[in-house]
Image (tube, rainbow, N blue to C red):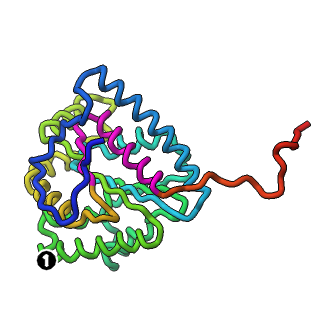
Amino acid sequence: MKNYQVKPGSKLNLGHYDPDDTGDFEKSAQDKEKAKAVTEKLIGKLDELQERLFTNGNRALLIVLQGMDTSGKDGTIKHVMSGINPQGCKVVTFKTPSAEELRHDFLWRVHQKAPEKGQIGIFNRSHYEDVLITRVHGLISRKVVQQRFNQIKEFEELLSENGTVTLKFFLHISKDEQKKRLEERINNPEKRWKFNEGDIEERKFWGNYIEAFEAMLAATSTERAPWHIVPANRKWYRNLVIAHHVVQALEGMKLKTPQAPAGINFDTLKIE
């Protein structure tokens, strides 16, 4: 698997990353099917590892998904997590803060939603919205943005020290691909429910968001909580990359196979 991880402290130019990249796979129907087959095997492995994570009960996995509108956050969750037990996975979306949440620091509501041990937590948009949309629309100063970068890194370090592995994925699509997906939502009656006029307004700030994402990725990718820039124009390749990294992270936890109940001799056990 090609390395899409952002090195801590690196300068970043998203223009150097091809959102249409497919790694070692060709952009052909045949290679697309090959990639899908590999992804299915990884999803099967993920099911097994998630069961071990749940029964071990001493570690947790947090998956953070960020990207432009239509970049595929929902699709990623639907496909990559299709084989796991829903009891062991929780998806959280952070919307506009409530009045109560605004009376606390910006990470207060986020910490409450971090996955408990034994669980996989998925943030579909996350605490990073507070250094993206707020920055693009001038709701906070550059000084506050830098403060929040530091606070986020400390927060994710705290999670790591308490047994949570954090994987962060930036779903990287091109402006042309976003246009295509927005038009599909408009023209396809089955997808119109996903359309939001605000997406068209936010598209006008594309350049500002690219600048904000570049600063965020460079400032907050760490050894313990790295960012991965995932080429997301091709949904099948996006799913493969993320499934690979999720399986790799769970395998790295060295999760043990659950032990059978003590005192039972399974060799002589008979059921009438």
- Chief secondary structure of the magenta portion: helix
Q: Quadrant of residue 62?
A: bottom left
| Residue drawn at x 59%, y 55% as measured from the top left | 256
Toward the right, the furthest residue is 272
User: Visible in this render: residue 133?
Assistant: no
Q: Is residue 216 above or below residue 151?
A: above
Total of numbered circles in the picture?
A: 1
The range drawn in magenta is: 228-252
Q: Nearer the viewer, residue 96 or 176?
A: 176
**Residue 124 percent coordinates (x, y):** 35, 53
Residue 246 magenta: yes
Which of these two is toward me, 175 or 146? 146
**Residue that carries the numbered disc 1 in the rendered image:** 143
Residue 125 drawn at (x, y percent): 31, 56
For the N terminus, give its image quadrant. Answer: top left
Residue 191 quadrant: top left
Type of the residue with mark 1 = Lys
In-image side of 127 versus 77 (left or right): left
